Image (cartoon, helix red, strand yellow):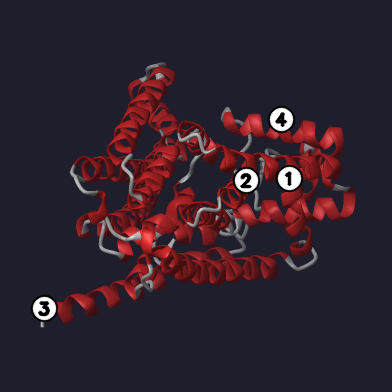
């Protein structure tokens, strides 16, 4: 009886959550706020594709061209003010090509098709990856947790492309387990979509002396860069580099206070206490994270491939903490590994359900807090509180995942007991 009650309670909660998500997107569409919150990133991709179609790919990285194409579609936050914040396209020119096709469609139609394709792709890939790697079918509960999680919703709401990162990371791992290092490295080159996701995995491959995977990564990576250089030309590549460095230093629309890394934590620390030591906090935090990852890997370096899942999960979670640009939805890079840990009962229930529920509750709480502050006209406080909640919900769970991995690795005297048994399905 109690089990059925828990089951029905969870189904009811999922139903309410779906209603809440649909409401948030529906309000933006109905109030003509599309591209303001809902669709904000897809609108940048769509406008970049439109620029490429009409003026050439090089112009995608020209701020004046971006402003010309984006101003008509983005709502102005301050209607009586000429200020407009351009949202750049911080990806290699080759990645503009798919959005040239979407730019041929009306923007809202393109947004819904883009999200539909992302949903179907992730749904299929999680089934495929889980069966291939662990030999077990993915459970309905795991699918519910992934597809109703806040990171997945944010990816859909904003129209982002983080699901592609998860597939690239997953295929790197799957092919590594199957003894195909060159192909594994080739898939890893897909993370050049967001190069900041590579800051730990590449040194890890060097540490393992996995030269064939690195050769695969280098070969496909150079191919992607070479094609991009041909497509955009010198001016386009120069503009791309300027946008990329601008995003990493807090310019453009990078929003570092909303990230889930040590950079975010240190900036909030400075804001709240009026100090100027964020660089030192970021360095100390990153060094502590790297030490923790080193201990995890040292405990898992035994002659059994079953421990690789925990190793790769730890590396990508640690990446979210130490890299210079990582928003909450970017945890989808690690979602194939998280799905297996959940699906096979490796992750404690408390941690699993906390990761799912706490960020959602924080988001709802912060929404009501902001509304209340808005009613009392506390605009500066409103913005700081919203960004504080937005950043810490991911930061805390990155730390919790990493400490859990450390604890699990420390208590792993026999690697063969760490399921799933990857050896049988490699």
> Which residue shows up at 72% across the image and 51% down it?
95
Observer-side mark, 4 or 1, equals 1
Determine contact: label 1, label 3, CB under 8 Å: no
Question: Disc 4 and disc 2: Cα gap in Å?
Answer: 22 Å
Few, some or many C-alpha atoms within 10 Å of disc 3 (few <14, some 14-19, many ≥20)? few
Residue assigned mark 1: 224
Q: Position of residue 254 (x, y in %)?
A: 57, 38
Q: What residue sits 53% from the left and 41% below the top? A: 197
Residue at the spot of label 4: 242
Name the spot of residue 404 as percent of width and height, x first: 25, 45
Q: Could you tell me if residue 89 is visible in this image?
A: no
Q: Which residue is mark 3?
A: 2
First in residue order: circle 4 vs circle 2: 2
Question: Residue at the location (36% across, 21% down)?
Answer: 284
Q: Nearer the viewer, residue 331 or 81?
A: 331
The residue pinned by badge 2 equals 189
Point out the tag, 3 or 4, that comes first from the N-terminus: 3
The residues tagged by marks 3 and 4 sit, at their Cα atoms, a distance apart of 58 Å
Quadrant of image for the C terminus: bottom left
């Amino acid at each position: 009886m109690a089990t059925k009650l828990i089951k029905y309670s969870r189904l009811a909660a999922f139903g309410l959550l779906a209603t809440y998500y649909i409401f948030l997107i529906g309000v933006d569409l109905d109030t003509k706020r599309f591209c303001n919150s809902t669709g904000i990133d897809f609108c940048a991709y769509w406008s970049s594709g439109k620029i490429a179609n009409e003026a050439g790919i090089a112009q995608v990285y020209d701020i004046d061209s971006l402003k010309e194409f984006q101003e008509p579609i983005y709502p102005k936050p301050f209607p009586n003010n000429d200020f407009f914040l351009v949202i750049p396209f911080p990806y290699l020119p080759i990645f503009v090509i798919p959005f040239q096709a979407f730019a041929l469609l009306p923007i809202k139609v393109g947004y819904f098709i883009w999200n539909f394709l992302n949903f179907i792709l992730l749904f299929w890939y999680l089934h495929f990856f889980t069966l291939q790697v662990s030999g077990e079918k993915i459970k309905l509960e795991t699918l519910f947790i992934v597809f109703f999680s806040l990171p997945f919703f944010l990816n859909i709401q904003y129209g982002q492309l983080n699901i592609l990162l998860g597939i690239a990371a997953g295929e790197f791992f799957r092919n590594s387990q199957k003894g195909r290092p060159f192909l594994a490295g080739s898939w890893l080159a897909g993370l050049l979509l967001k190069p900041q996701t590579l800051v730990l995995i590449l040194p890890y491959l060097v540490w393992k002396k996995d030269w064939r995977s690195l050769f695969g990564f280098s070969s496909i990576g150079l191919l992607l860069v070479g094609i991009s250089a041909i497509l955009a030309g010198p001016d386009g590549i120069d503009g791309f580099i300027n946008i990329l460095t601008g995003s990493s230093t807090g310019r453009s629309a990078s929003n570092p206070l909303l990230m889930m890394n040590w950079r975010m934590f240190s900036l909030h620390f400075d804001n709240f206490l009026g100090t100027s030591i964020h660089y030192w906090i970021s360095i100390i935090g990153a060094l502590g994270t790297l030490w923790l990852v080193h201990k995890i890997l040292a405990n898992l370096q035994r002659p059994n491939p079953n421990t690789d899942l925990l190793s790769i999960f730890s590396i990508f979670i640690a990446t979210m903490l130490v890299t210079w640009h990582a928003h909450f939805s970017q945890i989808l890079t690690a979602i194939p590994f998280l799905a297996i840990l959940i699906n096979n009962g490796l992750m404690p229930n408390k941690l699993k359900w906390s990761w799912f529920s706490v960020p959602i509750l924080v988001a709802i709480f912060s929404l009501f807090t902001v509304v209340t502050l808005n009613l009392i006209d506390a605009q500066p406080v409103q913005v700081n509180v919203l960004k504080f909640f937005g950043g810490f919900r991911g930061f805390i769970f990155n730390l919790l995942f990493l400490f859990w991995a450390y604890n699990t690795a420390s208590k792993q005297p026999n690697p063969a007991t760490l399921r799933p048994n990857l050896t049988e399905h490699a």
